[in-house]
């Protein structure tokens, strides 16, 4: 299971029990890496269905199965999708 929390410009992922702390710049680079992975290739016979991703700080390496990749793509989309702003008047 992958969970995501944020507090004062620090972004924390809990990736199957391992906590990963990212700055905003690292989060942007991670988002670009995740977006660049084509999910359709995981369903072809010649692909293992596993992606190995290193974070930009090179402190962590993630081994992503297809399910993890889909979940991370959804999380990244949620994080970077603008929310409606309600005006006070």
Image: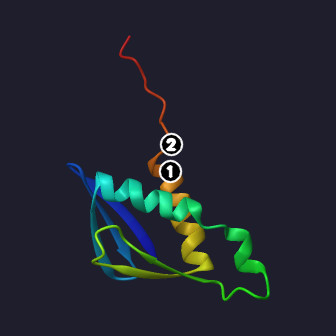
- In percent of the image, x 70 and y 78: which residue is there? 42
Residue 34, given in percent of the width and then of the height, sits at: 52, 64
How busy is the neighbourhood of tag 1: few (under 14 within 10 Å), some, or many (20 plus)?
Answer: few
Q: Residue 50 vs residue 10: left or right?
A: right
**Whole-percent x, y for residue 26 in the image:** 32, 59
Name the spot of residue 70 as percent of width and height, x first. 60, 68
The structure's colour scheme is: rainbow
Question: Which residue appears at 29% of the width and 75% of the height?
Answer: 19
Q: Which residue is mark 1?
A: 78
Residue 47 sits in which quadrant? bottom right
The front one of 68 and 51 is 51
Q: Which mark is residue 53?
A: none
Residue 45 left/right relative to 39: right
Mark 2 near mark 1, Cβ–Cβ under 8 Å?
yes
- The residue sitting at the left extreme is 8
Identify the secondary structure beneath mark 1. Answer: helix
Label 2 element class: loop
Q: Tell which residue pokes out farthest to the right in this image.
A: 45
Q: Nearer the viewer, residue 5 or 37?
A: 37
Displayed quadrant of residue 36: bottom right
Which residue is depicted at the point 50% across and 42% down? 81
Location of residue 2 in the rendering, given as x and y in whole percent from the top left corner:
44, 72
Label 2 Cα crowd, 10 Å radius (few <14 / some 14-19 / many 20+):
few
Q: How many marks?
A: 2
Residue 27, placed above or below residue 53: above
Quarter that holds the C terminus:
top left
Give the residue at mark 2.
Answer: 81
> Taking 82 as reference, is 22 left or right?
left
Mark 2–mark 1 Cα distance, whole angstroms, equals 5 Å
- Which corner quadrant of the image does residue 86 belong to? top left
């Amino acid at each position: 299971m992958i969970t995501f929390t944020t507090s004062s410009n620090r972004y924390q992922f809990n990736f199957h029990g391992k906590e990963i702390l990212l700055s905003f710049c690292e989060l942007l680079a991670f988002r670009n890496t995740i977006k660049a992975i084509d999910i359709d290739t995981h369903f072809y016979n010649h692909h293992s269905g596993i992606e190995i991703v290193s974070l930009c700080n090179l402190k962590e390496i993630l081994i992503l199965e297809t399910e993890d990749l889909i979940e991370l793509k959804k999380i990244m989309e949620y994080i970077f999708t603008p929310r409606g702003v309600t005006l006070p008047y």
